[in-house]
Image (cartoon, helix red, strand yellow):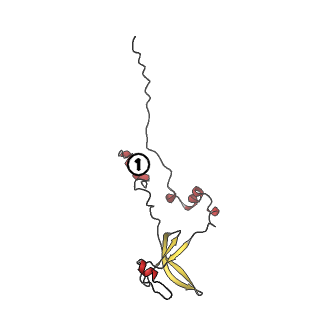
Amino acid sequence: MADITTQKPTRKMTVSPVKFAPLVRDLPTSAVTGVLGNLELVKDVKMDVTVELGRTNLPLKEVLQLGDESIIKLERLAGEPVDLLVNGRLIAQGEVVVIGGNFGVKITQVHKPQQTSDMSSDDMMMGDDMMDAYDEGGY
């Protein structure tokens, strides 16, 4: 019995790098609204806003001794900006003001978003960096 071998015809393939759509941060504001959808749908969602005057660490013994008229020294100096947090995330700093008998905060510096710690630097690679890594055999 003779061996029968069949060869499939080879097809020539063209391989080219992937082209990604621009990132949202690179788009004009009018385009972002279209990409993200109608923001009016979420504008009334309540967010927890906290103004943090300062923090400190105390041993349990001192915490148990706290009572009326106790004074706690904070790590922040008087006159330093306070932190403005939204849902626990620092978004700005400002100075304490009084508005008609109520405390308020005058924002003096807005912070840029930080990378989330659950994403590695490889996950954050985008745009030209991604294509460079692809060309160099990084993927």
Q: Is residue 2 left or right of residue 52?
A: left
Indicate the position of residue 128 as horizontal and vertical percent values.
41, 52
Indicate the position of residue 129 as horizontal and vertical percent values.
40, 52
SS class, disc 1: helix
- Residue placed most toward the observer, 128 or 113: 113
Residue lying at the far bottom in this picture: please name it. 69
- Residue placed most toward the observer, 111 or 25: 111
Q: Would you place residue 112 above or below residue 101 in this image? A: above
- The residue singled out by tag 1 in the image is 131
Q: Would you place residue 69 above or below residue 8 in this image? A: below
Q: Would you place residue 71 above or below residue 1 in this image? A: below
Q: Residue at x 61, y 68 (%)?
A: 46
Q: In this view, does 51 lie to the left or right of 139?
A: right
Quadrant that contains the C terminus: top left
Give the crowd class for mark 1: few <14, some 14-19, many >=20 residues within 10 Å. some
Indicate the position of residue 71 as horizontal and vertical percent values.
45, 86
Indicate the position of residue 42 as horizontal and vertical percent values.
62, 63
Q: Can residue 47 be seen in this view?
A: yes
Residue lying at the far top in this picture: please name it. 1
Q: Would you place residue 112 above or below residue 139 in this image? A: below
Q: Is residue 56 visible?
A: no
**Figure quadrant of residue 2:** top left
Q: Residue at x 57, y 56 (%)?
A: 35
**Figure quadrant of residue 7:** top left
Quadrant that contains the N terminus: top left
- Residue placed most toward the observer, 22 or 100: 100
Amino acid type at image mark 1: Met
Number of numbered discs overlaid on the protein picture: 1
